[in-house]
Amino acid sequence: MSGGVTFAMAGGGTGGHVMPLLAVAQELRRRGHRPVFIGTRQGLEARLVPAAGFPIEWIEIGGWKRVGLRRALRTLRQLPWSVARVLAIFRRWKPAAVFSLGGYVAAPVMAAALLGRVPYVVMEPNAVPGFASRWFGRFAARALLSFPETAAWFPPGRTELTGVPVREEFFSIPPKPLGEEFVLMISGGSQGSRRLNQAARDSWPLFRESGFAVRFLHQTGPAEYAEVAHAFAGSGLRGEIVSFFEDMAAALAAADLVVCRAGAGALAELAAAGRPAILVPFPYAADDHQRRNAEAAARAGAARVVPDGECTGARLFREVTELASRPDLLEAMGRAARARARPDAARRAATLLEEAAGSRGRVDTANPRSNNSL
């Protein structure tokens, strides 16, 4: 596409939504385009997007699943005002196309794109799409997927298996041979995980008493950071407790093994970095998609899966020490993880956005299956 144009980036709340958007935005910027984000002041995008040097516009919208009746009703009241706000943003920025990663932040953006006849590309990183992607995906120029079975939710001919975009620095992480000290990285995501935090704390005495040489890199999330950090200071173990990994690529580069949830974004970063993992799927994720994500990684030989209810300090200690005693298995798991990586995901997403913007093709909203382009 000759000459740079503006693209609106929709999605936010958690790192799983924001990080892939940033990866695609960085690729668009390299091509001379102008990405502008649309998000909320409460989501992680409020911190990460300005830090990456991208403009962001604010809307007020909340979730409606598993939030209670009062919160859901409030979101419904916010929706028309948020759509109107996005339409005003569109009039000012004049985006040529929209890139959506789904979720409650993206719903009013895609609604405004339909009303404003702005083409959009949706990305669905999980095996089962969320409500916003399922509904608005019927009218998308393209739906970019991580699992072949997800195509059943979208019009035929408009899906493509691209994987989740990951920033380029993750792909340059080299394999890490085991050293004298085993580096265990634990992350419950940007919001943290009470289950993983508690399991880690319960494992500390077992690691200390065993004499196993371990160093912890633990992202707790903001809610429990102070408590966990204070307790770790008296544990007698080596490591670092943080609320949020400011440089996730550096943390993965240092890790010998990762314990984390099974969101699609986390699995994509593990694959890009080639790191073996113990996955603890969040049991209340929409449509149980984290369990499906984790099982796919385990079938590929890249991870072990521990159900949330079984993730105790004793189980964590046992799994970690067993894997640490088998460097050949850890190495094989790392190779299997890297084999799942899709280094071209961000570039492919950017290309499809350029195609949507260049054609300015409009999907027939009365018959969403009439514009198949594959």
Image (cartoon, grey):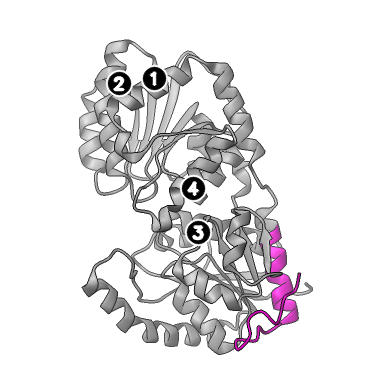
Q: Is residue 96 above or below residue 286?
A: below
Dot 2 falls on a residue whose secondary structure is loop
Image x and y of residue 9, in percent: 54, 69
> From this viewpoint, which residue is outermost toward the right?
2
Front residue (pair 140, 33): 140
Label at residue 214: 1
Label at residue 237: 2
Label at residue 128: 3
Distance from Cα at disc 2 to Cα at disc 3? 40 Å
**Of callouts 4 and 2, the N-terminal one:** 2
4 and 3 marks in contact (CB < 8 Å): yes
1 vs 4, front mark: 4
Q: Which image quadrant: the C terminus?
A: bottom right
1 and 2 marks in contact (CB < 8 Å): yes
Image x and y of residue 203, in percent: 28, 25
Among the 4 quarters of the image, the one containing residue 226: top left
Check residue 366 for magenta coloring: yes
Q: Is residue 237 above or below residue 185?
A: above
Distance from Cα at disc 4 to Cα at disc 3? 9 Å
**Of callouts 4 and 3, the N-terminal one:** 3
